[in-house]
Image: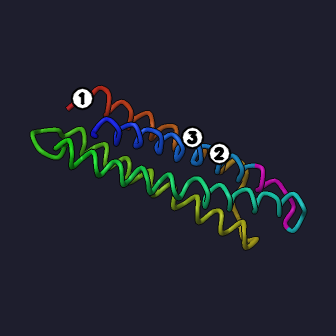
Amino acid sequence: MYEWVKALHVISVIAWMAALFYAPRLFVYHADSVVGSEKSETFKVMERRLMKAIATPAMAATWVFGIALLVMGGWLTGGNYWIHAKLLFVLVLTGFDGMCRRWMRDFANDRNTRSARFFRIANEVPTLLVIVIVILVIVKPF
């Protein structure tokens, strides 16, 4: 059963990461569109659907399957300190997801004050976090 849960965890992580890679890219283009324009309204729909239909269920599944793996695998015992670091970075990633939701609401309410450049930089955050997380899981450095 452990291998099935692990497979479902990896699948949900991939879906969640796809949403977190795509959301800031949408915000880049949305920031350059005129408030109230057809283009801006289209981005609002795309952002809402991305977060509600993909990011939310994928994040929830990632956490559920991840916690199941922690319990089933006994990873919180026996000096597996890498898992504590991984969990810290997953919490940061979850915080980034929350920021994306806040930015989405700002756009939805025509209150965005951030530039396209800001979102281009923000677009790199999930990449850096996933690199660290994958290294911790595969290498288990401590």
Q: Nearer the viewer, mark 2 or mark 1?
A: 2
Residue of label 2: 22
Which amino acid is tagged 3?
Glu
Query: Closer to the N terminus: mark 2 or mark 1?
Result: 2
Is 87 situated left or right of 121 in this image?
left
At x 64%, y 51%, the residue is 23
Q: Residue 20: percent from the left, percent from the top?
A: 57, 48
Residue, far right = 38
Q: Which mark is residue 124?
A: 3
Compared with residue 28, is residue 104 higher up or lower down, i.e. above or below? below
Tell me if residue 109 is in the magenta stretch: no
Say what amino acid the circle numbered 1 marks: Pro
Instruction: Tell me which corner region of the image, top left, top right, bottom left or bottom right, holds residue 64.
Output: bottom left
Q: Position of residue 68 (x, y in %)?
A: 28, 50
Residue 141's mark? Answer: 1
Q: Is residue 31 magenta?
A: yes
